[in-house]
Image: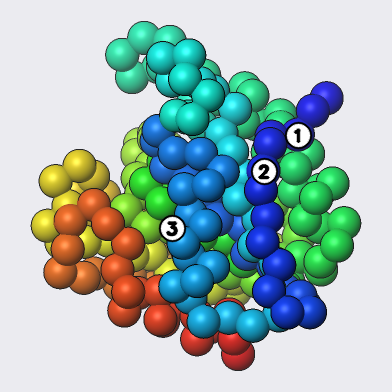
Amino acid sequence: MKSVKYSSIKIGDPQKAIVAIHGFKGNSKSFHFLSNTMEINNIEWFFPEAPYLIDKNITTRSWSYEISEGDYDVTKTKEQFPIFLEEKVFSKYHPKNVFFIGFSQGAVVCYEFVLYLNFKIGGVFPIAGFFRNSKLKKSRFHPIQINTPIIIGHGIKDDIVSVEQSRFIYKTLKNQNANVKLVEYNGRHKINLDYLKEITKLIND
């Protein structure tokens, strides 16, 4: 079974890794700018590319395929994303030294897949995301991630994914005793520089 495609950038002598997961209509190059924006030395950046094409365009991709309204197929992501992590990331770096950033649909990947990994990771940073199934009552993370730092970011003026989505997620995770923090910022459906500074500090510690 194959892995999702990806690109990577090494800075210095990498001791840690960041997996940056793009959003809807993105690709493996969408988050390259983060490697310059975030001041982190000795790091390897991994930029996985979603397996589903949008309108048969290889540069616009999705982590899910809408079968019908509200019904999504994530089979390729479920099968290929873990292979990418195992073969390309965790084969080189201890999981506790691996951090995940996901924006919008990429944040959904963090919530649906990354938080259920059965070994402790360094941290998870979902931005402007949502729960695909908000009524699901089961635990939203694997027990081993109980102390894993989760820092959620969301713009209060987001007109694509309401900040209420992240407020609901924060409350849900907090009630399940996760190590979670919500950072709201004055912006729309974007990544905020002050938020990036906060997670940069955590990764550098």
Marks 1 and 2: CB-CB under 8 Å? yes
Pointer 2: what residue? 6
Q: Is 28 situated above or below 127?
A: above
Residue 93, horizontal then vertical, whole percent: 81, 66
Location of the C terminus (image quadrant)? bottom right
Residue 128, horizontal then vertical, whole percent: 32, 53
Marks 1 and 3: CB-CB under 8 Å? no
Pointer 1: what residue? 3
Q: Is residue 109 visible?
A: no
Pointer 3: what residue? 126
**From mark 2 to mark 3, how far is it between C-alphas?**
19 Å
Q: Of 72 and 171, which appears nearest the observer?
A: 72
Disc 1 secondary structure class? loop
Q: Of 27 and 71, which appears nearest the observer?
A: 27
How many residues crowd around disc 1 within 10 Å: few (fewer than 14), some, or many (20 or more)? many
Location of the N terminus (image quadrant)? top right
Three-letter residue code for mark 2: Tyr
**Which is nearer the N-term, disc 1 or disc 3?**
1
Query: Which image quadrant for residue 40?
Result: bottom right
Q: Of 136 and 129, which appears nearest the observer?
A: 129
Task: Look at discs 1 and 3 and give the one toward the viewer.
Answer: 1
Q: Which residue is drawn at 21% across and 61% down?
A: 155
**In the image: residue 56, left or right of residue 159:** right
How many residues crowd around disc 2 within 10 Å: few (fewer than 14), some, or many (20 or more)? some
Q: Is residue 182 visible?
A: yes
Three-letter residue code for mark 1: Ser
**Which is nearer the N-term, disc 2 or disc 3?**
2
